[in-house]
Amino acid sequence: MQALLRELRERVRHAHESRTPLRLRGAGTKDFYGERCEGQLLELHGYAGVLAYEPAELVLTARCGTRLSEIEALLAAQRQFLAFEPPALGGDPTIGGIVAAGLSGPRRARAGAARDFVLGTLLLGCDGELLHFGGTVMKNVAGFDVSRLLCGSLGILGPVLEVSLKVLPLPPAQQTLRFEMAEGEALAAFNRWAGQPLPLCATAWFDGQAWVRLSGAASAVRASAQQLGGERIESEPAAAFWRSARDQTHPLLSRAASLWRLSLPSTAAPLSLAPPAAQLIEWGGALRWCATDRPAAEMRAIAAAAGGSAMHWRGGASGSRFHPLAPPVLELPRRLKARFDPHGIFNPGRLVAEL
Amino acid sequence: MPAQPDDPVNDPARNGAGDEPRWSELAAQPPSPERARAVELALRERLPADCVLSREEELRPYECDGLAVFHQRPMLVVLPHTEAQVRDVLLECRRLDVPVVARGAGTGLSGGAMPHAAGVVLSLARFNRILEIDPLARTARVQPGVRNLAVSEAAAPHGLYYAPDPSSQIACTIGGNVAENSGGVHCLKYGLTVHNVLGLRGYTMDGAPVTLGGRALDAPGLDLLALMLGSEGLLLVITEVILKLVPKPALAQVVMASFDDVGKAGDAVAAIIAAGIIPAGLEMMDRKAAAAVEPFVQAGYDLTAEAILLAESDGTPDEVADEVAAMERVLRAAGATAIAVSHSEAERLRYWSGRKNAFPAAGRVSPDYYCMDGTIPRKAIGQVLKAIEQLEHKYQLKCMNVFHAGDGNLHPLILFDANQSGAWQRADAFGADILELCVQLGGTITGEHGVGVEKLNSMCVQFSPAERAAFFAVKRAFDPAGLLNPGKAIPTLARCAEYGKLHVHHGRLPHPELPRF
């Protein structure tokens, strides 16, 4: 690994000096994701391996190329897990790619996002320097929280070579409930329930059915299931449903010719699209997947009016994928990029066309 | 970070190394009377008369924050009423090249709000309104001068509360909590401030408005919101915050366990986590702390115990019953010599009262105390407590320990008498040794109090020159002129050279074979 590390540092330093753009890549499960980006391929999946895992410390540290499957197996053996449920997206992503994309699964609204579990990172700076930020302890306010800035940065500030993540014990019990509900009714119920002391860990709505997953102590799950009612779903079909939402194998997500991801306040009203688009709603109403070929401008206007943003996730017409940022909003990211990567060698344009 | 000679505010000839600030130009010396008058006139022209304080007796209360050993009278204090006035203050100070230090309630414990001699203190005390509670969306939109506890009080009628609860929550403000990424007793289960802030608004030192995050759970572009949490007032002046509220648990109970050895108590903490339990709070007090608080609060602490653990469970009544039973089993197996469980809300609060009142109790037993804030891996708790005992002999000072054991966040309280010559210097060196030990064990020099001016030297131990340069690069991106809370949080290369201690590489000592402490 030391030889590979030297080689990665050398390649980055050389790219910086020769002003050669690099395209960072782990397992490639998110090649489709984000804006198009040109550059020499910098493969990171080889820099792999779990460096430290102590269950009683609730922390796992791994090199960026470590596969999600390896980490999940290691955690499961100790009855622990990554509580933000990173999407596998039809492959076996690397932990570096998971942090770079910052995507989270069904548990996000209750448990937190990928960035909430990032405790520390090792960044490879553009001049080949190794920079540690954060650490491996639960609370740490020494220095700016660059680790969380890197989460979701899609590599534009440099490759994250190592990452320390907070892990949690697996909840002892789970129960999924299903309700026949119209969209508006489900949105109202999700928000109402989230304000009550219930062990609600995920919610979803699709095609007239609301799905609710309870998790926690067996007694709490049992009592809450009784209180909420609905149809109790067996653990296998329940797990399959949540897995399909998390990994995007759900038919709405995998088969849509053009898929939009709207991130909205959870209380935003049902979308008024004409004709109505097929939707999968997650995160208590805060995430709405729409299969639609409506024009980008219209989708973005709808999301903005509701207080959120719209990303063209997959398929459809070419054009920018992320919700565009207004020029004044771009100023601070532009300055950060200029300081971390003055020659623009890291994933140019991948997160924001201008950066 | 590479230097950028084409950048006029980052001319290496004018500055320190790379992005380091212009220390020579911002020397912390009082301004000339002419300069002070010119700045005062310029600000008075922009602000109503009641917004500018300049008389000596008006300035004195702003000399320090909760860490009074670091104090400095500011040139001026401004107390704006509106966001437009905040912007005007920043624009005017930027134009006149005047440092600005934003301030909330001044309860901080690292000197982060200590004024600058030639600068303006920008107090946000008048930004004290809760603008909106949205019970369905479970959010509160508040101004930064709102007190932490006031948010939970306003949310209570809806069965909701704001989870982060630093010990100073009756006084400390949300703006300060954002600046320090404050934690508290319940952050093991409910997260730090960074996990409970959805969005914020503020201004850069250049007076440019900035909105980050919002009511949605994510936003396009870089996550600058996360970067603001714990940024100690160096990047933005915050004028509005959107907070996440969570449902109040139906029930909470606390288990109190005694141990005859601090090492066993430390191992019990790890055992609880290893058993798959995340308590709502998991706190520890050593014998000295229990002895100091018991006469004060009469909580019924076991004064024969070397350490007392407080472990809270919350949730539905069935869930709490199961979890309390499980924790009792683990604590017994770990060698607890006595266990008590709270059976009423009054009893629960009484068990907690000593932990929450540890600081004032320290004030009762010693003329002065110095509170540290390192974080370590949980497994090292016993080791650190024993090392602290040795340091007590080395520095001839007592130290009592209360801390967030579940997070590994230590708060050693070093007791001293500032009237004794050299006592503060010994306390300071004692504290620095503890923090260095935290870094050596793979931890950090500050869990929740911030670096401020207090821990600048210890930053040299935790971060390499390249890492500190990266922090200055972030600072420059937000505040090219280096005027916002200058001299805090990040030490310069020169300062670290002068301090002369080794940078400990990521918890790995340069010579691990050498015995230390």
Image (cartoon, coloured by chain):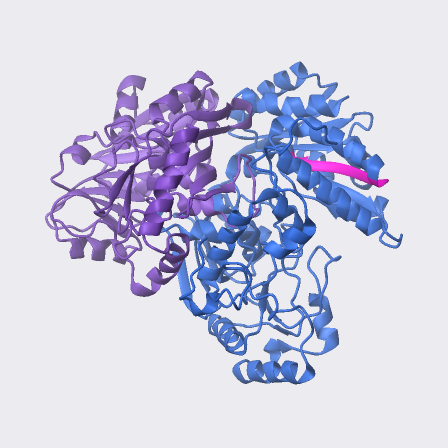
Chain colours: A purple, B blue
Residue shown at the point (83%, 41%) measured from the top left: B395
Q: Residue at x 63, y 54 (%)?
A: B452
Dominant secondary-structure state across the stretch colored magenta: strand
- Does residue B285 appear to the left or right of A239 in the view shown? right
Image location of residue B353, percent across then percent down: 72, 39
Q: Nearer the viewer, residue A262 or B180?
A: B180
Q: Which residues are magenta?
A: B395-404
Q: Is residue B11 left or right of residue A113?
A: right
Where is residue B18 shown, x and y percent of the image? 50, 58
Q: Nearer the viewer, residue A305 or B86?
A: B86
Q: Is residue A112 above or below residue A241?
A: below
Q: Is residue B70 visible?
A: yes
Q: Nearer the viewer, residue A36 or B174?
A: A36
User: Is residue B118 positioned above or below A147 on the image?
Assistant: below
* Residue B131 in view, yes or no: no
Of residues B136 and B502, the one drawn nearer to the viewer in this rendering: B502
Quadrant (top left, top right, bottom left, bottom right) of the C terminus of chain B? top right
Using residue B301 as the reference point, say whether residue B92 is left or right of it: left
Could you tell me residue B32's position as x and y percent? Answer: 68, 81
Badge count:
0
Up-down relation of residue B165 to residue B123 (above or below): above
Residue B350 is a magenta residue? no
Image spot of residue A230 (x, y percent): 30, 27
Residue extending furthest toward the right: B420
Quick check: A115 above or below B59? above
Question: In the image, is B353 to the left or to the right of B379?
Answer: right
Q: Residue drawn 57% across and 73% down?
A: B98
Residue B403: say if magenta. yes
